[in-house]
């Protein structure tokens, strides 16, 4: 992969270029840029999620550049044409932990010659990376916009435990991380959580080597999580219990005996629906499918393993009690379950984690891929936020 060239310019809208930035925290980082022709512009950094690429931002980059910004979107560690990361399931998992992903973003900003950026914007799993950037280095990341995944703050340290009575074994069992998975498996329709499935050894092969092929898999996956799928009518869940979580679609709470490729296959859109999909026509989907056929999905799946295995939780507890104090905003599609998949998270983000939250916006006509499904409204909302943030 180290010899891979830039993305073919014919795949990009005029005004967006593809290039590489070397020596970014051990990476040769592939970036897309817009508004690069004029020096001295303020920079906006855009961070994608799973299973996406820098290419996911193509529809908002030009409006932001037209407003006077230098807009930069990298293929993050584990994705696309960025190289220098370990693709092996048994390889260097620690390099994919959140603090190192934030270090990637900081290193890219420095390599580009900026002391600070006007905003860091993150979508899906890019949202917690953006949030940690703003929490750890508010002097560099002067505002933050989070999309689809609310940020609830650093994990708490156990507090005032020295005088507390030891927990009973029953209480410990009910509080254990495994209990929710046991409860999901015991439902009348046995289920499992997608993030723990994504952490399994077989998840990459299940998607990369699926019978329908990567292109058809991605078409069904993107469709299933978009506003085009009529079943996406999200609502707040009452609690982190199996019965409540099972109210979400199967792309989040999967059938116990199915992988993700088999989960999304029944939701494959028809030929007429594909032809009518303006936000992701076949030629654009081909950019994704070509990249993931080449790289596989394991790079992105390592991010989930860092979260579910819990081995890097302790270093995040170092920042327990810290808040995001730069101007912040949240944007999601009105048809996106992402805002509700962790019960109470959107409220905790607004009430505690972000002290200068300037708005929480749910966009009509968009599901999970909000910046692709409704790019004009997202661009307008981001520019308004940047103006309000000063």
Image: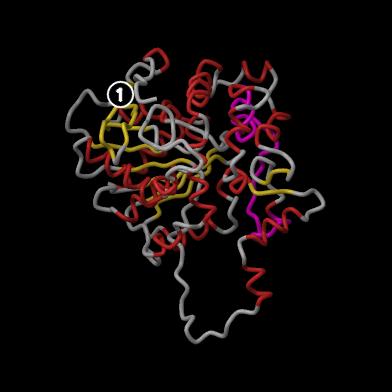
Q: Number of labelled discs?
A: 1
Mark 1 residue element = strand
Q: Position of residue 5 (x, y in %)?
A: 34, 19
Question: Which quadrant of the structure image shows residue 213?
Answer: top right
Magenta-drawn segment: 216-244
Q: Nearer the viewer, residue 50 or 340?
A: 50
What residue do we see at 69% from left, 41% from top?
Answer: 250
Instruction: Give the x, y percent position of residue 68.
Output: 26, 31
- Residue nearest the viewer, comparing 279 with 197: 197
Magenta residue check for 200: no
Residue position for label 1 = 19
- Answer above or below: position of 294 versus 240: above
On screen, residue 194 versus residue 191, left or right, reads left
Quadrant of the image containing the N terminus: top left
From what the image shows, is residue 316 above or below residue 213? Answer: below
Asked if the stretch drawn in magenta spans residue 237, the answer is: yes
Vertically, is 16 above or below 23? above
**Residue 228 image position (x, y, % from top left):** 63, 30
Image check: 186 left or right of 119? Answer: right
């Amino acid at each position: 992969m180290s010899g891979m060239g830039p993305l073919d310019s014919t795949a990009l809208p005029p005004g967006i270029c593809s290039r590489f930035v070397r020596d970014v925290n051990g990476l040769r980082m592939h970036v897309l840029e817009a508004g690069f022709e004029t020096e001295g512009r303020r920079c906006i950094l855009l961070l994608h999620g799973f299973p996406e690429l820098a290419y996911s931002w193509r529809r908002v980059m030009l409006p932001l550049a037209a407003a006077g910004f230098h807009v930069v979107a990298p293929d993050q560690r584990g994705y696309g044409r960025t190289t220098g990361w370990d693709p092996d399931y048994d390889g260097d998992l620690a390099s994919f932990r959140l603090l190192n992903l934030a270090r990637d973003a900081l290193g890219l900003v420095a390599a580009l010659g900026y002391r600070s950026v006007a905003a860091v914007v993150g979508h899906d799993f890019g949202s917690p990376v953006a949030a940690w950037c703003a929490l750890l280095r508010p002097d560099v990341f002067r505002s933050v916009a989070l999309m689809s995944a609310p940020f609830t703050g650093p994990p708490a340290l156990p507090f005032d435990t020295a005088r507390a009575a030891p927990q009973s074994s029953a209480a410990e069992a009910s509080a254990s991380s495994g209990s929710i998975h046991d409860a999901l498996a015991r439902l009348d329709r046995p289920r499992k959580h997608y993030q723990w499935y994504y952490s399994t050894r077989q998840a990459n092969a299940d998607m990369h080597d699926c019978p329908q092929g990567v292109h058809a898999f991605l078409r069904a996956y993107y469709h299933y999580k978009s506003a085009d799928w009529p079943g996406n009518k999200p609502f707040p869940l009452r609690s982190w219990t199996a019965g409540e979580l099972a109210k979400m679609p199967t792309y989040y709470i999967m059938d116990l005996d199915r992988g993700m490729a088999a989960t999304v296959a029944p939701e494959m859109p028809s030929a007429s629906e594909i032809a009518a999909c303006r936000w992701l026509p076949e030629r654009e989907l081909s950019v994704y499918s070509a990249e993931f056929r080449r790289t596989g999905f394991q790079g992105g799946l390592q991010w989930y393993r860092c979260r579910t295995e819990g081995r890097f939780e302790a270093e995040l507890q170092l920042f327990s009690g810290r808040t995001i104090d730069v101007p912040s905003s949240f944007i999601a599609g009105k048809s996106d379950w992402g805002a509700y998949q962790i019960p109470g998270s959107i409220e905790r983000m607004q009430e505690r984690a972000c002290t200068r939250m300037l708005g929480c916006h749910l966009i009509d006509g968009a599901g999970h891929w909000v910046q692709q499904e409704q790019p004009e409204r997202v661009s307008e909302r981001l520019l308004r936020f940047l103006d309000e943030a000063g």
